[in-house]
């Protein structure tokens, strides 16, 4: 009979008013008692009300923990039921997927093993239900197709479910079964399986799968939905078609069908085919010569000119991918020449041959933008800028002659879109061509660039700030010229007050400028007594500190950019700016102390931003500790250690980033204080051991291991009282099969640091260490 909670809810629509009843049901949950329970819970997982959503998720977790097999079987029933709404079926599919797979690789393996531990008869029943539901859903993409794929990820590698691929192929090719909806869903499942399952597992079916996919992609297929699903399936399966691409006849057929699909009137099919074409060129570059001139080049150029953003993006991506490939081949050829051996592949120089046709299209595309475009949206204008950067890197000086006239003609164009395109084009070609060629060009352009930082258009200001940053990074001599530096610095300081998208790029430009100024300064004893920015160093630091406190600092990554700039100023400060560093040290410490006082008073919506601010201040403090002298470090050491210990306290959880930053800052303090750090050992030891035992974040564990090495090198024999506990902790991590592999080599190195520090006292630990070292030497 239904439970009390189930009887209360049968026939009762789930709503905000049902919360108390719903909460009562959680305490007496019995999944099988009423199907209506599960339907309403699945509907609740889409609720905008956070409380309802959390309760629904808790209900489902409890269901899975109570009886996973029954829970998944019930979800399969809901997914397979044509009487259920789209919302319920999609929610059932999503929950099913969430309990058999995960993004984290370790968790994913655990979920797959948990699935395989379910009784075979029950698993077979579930698989049959979901497989039979392919093509019965009214939504696309198919939830059932995704569930089939994730079950396949668990089953196929072990040889289970051998009937799956033949069944999917029959859904596509058998006229008795292959309705349009069944073909689409089955092709989606094939695509997901090809994407998720290792190609070696599918090798025995590779030709059959490819044949079915190609058949559904052909222009003779009347359904655009089928062609779209098939094209995406091919996109996901290209990695294991290498044998087919090695055979000319099969390669010709594949290329013919893909090129035909790029001309489809359905834009979804066209875009998927263009994506496939891009990936083919990247994977099988060496086979493309026969197709480039007569097919791929004209198709890609037409796509680039398209007014449809999705199509244009793929046309641009085609040439970006070839740039990447040919740049890699150039590096490989140079290495082969140095080593006096033949390169594995030879560049066909497609990009160099296409420059005169492609660059003008890219320049025109740079003008395709709107003033209020979202900064985070990827559009043809941004893609064109990236492609131009790649072409400059790939072809060097050959790009200059094609871009420079456009820049010169449009820097003062009355239309802001053309001014912006000109400055973006200029910034995009600063890396790749010879510096000797670019230096005079950039020197002439600098006054205009400085002026354009105050352009009437905010978009142009933003692009100019990025370009000036590129100049400071790649061709700093032009920026550091005396006749340019003074007006540039004056303008950059003013621009720090501009909107976040501009000010963020200004911070980056200042970072590059201070690093370049330090690098070219005349050094004495590895440190310059002064440099070009010394007269305004204090002003710049003060202005950057103001930026870190801006109310809009969370926009456009501005606050992070300002702190990163401060870190560069600390790192690249000459002797005559040390007083400013001393003052900034106290300011940063005070800011950190104020932020830590807010712990516990930050609401959930502000936690991430609060933790980011802590990490930024901690990283800046770490930079300061690496720069100041020991005497100054001793004056602030107590306050620094108090703040860092608070950040490492268990009350703040075992969060990865924050604890890692704090441990690294402790490492810098150890390096600064040397033997004098011993006074903090007793207070610090619990936090160090906790970091070593942190299994939630291997980065925290690695940072703790690093700190142990710092202690051994700094304290020498004084670390002896701690070594027993620390070595026990290190051995525990080393012998833990679940510990991240990247941490273990670091531990082996730290054993050496400890042995050197305590000398003969290491003998008591020798047997255990040598045993694990012996095991490590045999590890694969």
Image (cartoon, rainbow, N blue to C red):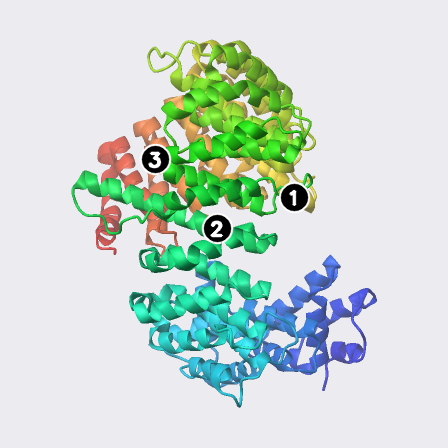
Say if 621 sits above or below 736 in the image.
Answer: above
In the picture as drawn, the residue positioned furthest to the bottom comes out as: 176
Residue 461 shown left or right of residue 332 in the figure: right
Give percent across and percent down for residue 578: 48, 13
The residue beneath circle 1 is: 374
Give percent across and percent down for residue 230: 50, 71
Location of residue 544 by image quarter? top right
The residue beneath circle 2 is: 317
* SS at circle 3: helix
> Image point 32% across, 59% down: which residue?
287
Nearer mark to the viewer, of 2 and 1: 2
Nearer mark to the viewer, of 3 and 1: 1
Residue in front for this viewpoint, 640 or 482:
482
| Residue 202 makes an appearance in the image | yes
Instruction: Look at the numbered discs 3 and 2 and tell me whether their residues touch, using CB distance below 8 Å.
Output: no
Instruction: Look at the numbered discs 3 and 1 and tell me whether their residues touch, using CB distance below 8 Å.
Output: no
Location of residue 495 by image quarter? top right
| Residue 558 makes an appearance in the image | no
Which quadrant, please, contains the C terminus?
A: bottom left
Say if 176 sits above or below 510 in the image.
Answer: below
Residue in front for this viewpoint, 293 or 674:
293
Residue in front for this viewpoint, 628 or 154:
154
Instruction: Compare marks 2 and 1 and give the one earlier in the sequence.
Output: 2
In the picture as drawn, the residue positioned furthest to the right comes out as: 17
Which quadrant, please, contains the N terminus?
A: bottom right
* SS at circle 1: loop
Q: Residues within 10 Å of mark 3 (few under 14, many from 20)?
A: many
| Residue 709 badge | 3
Determine the CA span between mark 3 and mark 2: 46 Å
Instruction: Compare marks 3 and 1 and give the one earlier in the sequence.
Output: 1
């Amino acid at each position: 009979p239904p439970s009390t909670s189930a009887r209360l809810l049968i026939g009762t629509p789930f709503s905000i008013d049902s919360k108390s009843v719903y909460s009562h049901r959680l305490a007496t949950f019995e999944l099988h008692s009423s199907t209506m329970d599960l339907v309403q819970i699945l509907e609740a997982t889409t609720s905008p009300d956070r409380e309802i959503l959390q309760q629904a998720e808790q209900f489902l977790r409890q269901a899975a923990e109570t009886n996973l097999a029954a829970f998944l079987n019930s979800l399969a029933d809901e997914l397979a039921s044509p009487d259920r709404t789209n919302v319920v079926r999609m929610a059932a599919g999503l929950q099913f997927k969430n309990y058999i797979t995960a993004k984290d690789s370790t968790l994913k393996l655990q979920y797959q093993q948990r699935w395989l531990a379910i009784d075979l008869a029950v698993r077979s029943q579930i698989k049959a239900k979901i497989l039979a539901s392919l093509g019965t859903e009214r939504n696309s993409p198919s939830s059932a197709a995704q569930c089939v794929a994730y079950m396949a990820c668990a089953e196929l590698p072990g040889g289970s479910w051998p009937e799956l691929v033949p069944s999917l192929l029959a859904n596509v090719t058998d006229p008795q079964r292959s309705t349009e909806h069944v073909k689409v869903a089955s092709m989606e499942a094939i695509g997901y399986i090809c994407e998720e399952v290792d190609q070696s597992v599918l090798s025995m079916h590779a030709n059959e799968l490819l044949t079915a996919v190609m058949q559904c992609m052909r222009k003779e297929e009347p359904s655009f939905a089928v062609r779209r699903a098939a094209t995406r399936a091919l996109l996901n399966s290209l990695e294991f078609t290498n044998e087919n691409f090695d055979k000319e006849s099969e390669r010709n057929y594949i290329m013919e069908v893909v090129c035909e699909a790029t001309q489809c009137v359905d834009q979804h099919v066209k875009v998927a085919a263009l994506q496939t074409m891009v990936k083919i060129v990247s994977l099988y570059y060496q086979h493309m010569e026969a197709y480039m001139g007569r097919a791929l080049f004209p198709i890609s150029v037409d796509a680039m000119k398209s007014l449809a953003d999705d199509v244009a993006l793929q046309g641009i991506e085609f040439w970006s991918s070839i740039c990447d490939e040919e740049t890699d081949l150039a590096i490989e050829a140079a290495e082969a020449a140095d080593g006096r051996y033949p390169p594995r592949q030879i560049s066909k120089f497609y990009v160099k041959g296409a420059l005169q046709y492609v660059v003008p299209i890219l320049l025109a595309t740079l003008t395709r933008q709107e003033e209020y475009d979202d900064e985070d949206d990827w559009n043809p204008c941004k893609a064109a800028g990236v492609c131009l950067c790649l072409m400059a890197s790939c072809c060097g000086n050959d790009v200059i002659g094609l871009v420079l006239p456009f820049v010169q003609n449009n820097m003062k164009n009355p239309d802001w879109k053309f001014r912006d395109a000109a400055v973006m084009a200029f910034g995009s070609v600063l890396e790749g061509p010879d510096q000797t060629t670019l230096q005079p060009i950039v020197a002439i352009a600098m006054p205009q660039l400085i002026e354009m930082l105050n352009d009437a258009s905010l978009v142009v200001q933003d692009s100019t700030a990025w370009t000036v940053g590129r100049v400071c990074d790649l061709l700093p001599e032009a920026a550091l010229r005396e006749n340019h530096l003074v007006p540039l610095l004056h303008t950059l300081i003013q621009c720090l007050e501009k909107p976040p998208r501009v000010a963020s790029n200004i911070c980056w430009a200042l970072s590059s400028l201070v690093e370049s100024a330090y690098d070219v300064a005349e050094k004495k004893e590895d440190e310059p007594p002064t440099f070009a920015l010394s007269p305004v160093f204090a002003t710049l630091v003060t202005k950057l500190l103001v930026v870190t406190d801006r109310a809009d600092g969370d926009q456009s990554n501005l606050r992070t950019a300002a702190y990163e700039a401060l870190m560069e100023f600390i790192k690249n400060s000459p002797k005559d700016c040390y007083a400013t560093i001393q003052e900034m040290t106290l300011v940063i410490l005070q800011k950190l102390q104020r932020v830590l006082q807010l712990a516990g008073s930050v609401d959930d919506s502000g936690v991430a931003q609060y933790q980011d601010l802590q990490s930024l201040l901690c990283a800046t403090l770490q930079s300061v500790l690496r720069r100041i002298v020991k005497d100054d470090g001793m004056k602030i050491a107590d306050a620094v250690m108090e703040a860092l210990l608070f950040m490492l306290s268990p009350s703040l959880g075992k969060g990865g980033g924050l604890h890692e930053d704090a441990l690294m800052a402790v490492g810098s303090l150890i390096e600064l204080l040397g033997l004098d750090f011993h006074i903090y050992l007793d207070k610090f030891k619990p936090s160090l051991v906790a970091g070593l035992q942190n299994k939630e974040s291997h980065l925290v564990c690695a940072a703790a291991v690093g700190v142990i090495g710092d202690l051994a090198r700094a304290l020498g024999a004084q670390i002896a009282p701690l070594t027993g506990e620390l070595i026990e902790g290190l051995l525990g991590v080393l012998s833990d099969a679940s510990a991240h592999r990247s941490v273990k080599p670091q531990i082996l190195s730290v054993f050496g640091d400890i042995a050197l520090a305590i000398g003969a006292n290491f003998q008591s630990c020798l047997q255990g260490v040598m045993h694990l070292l012996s095991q490590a030497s045999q590890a694969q």
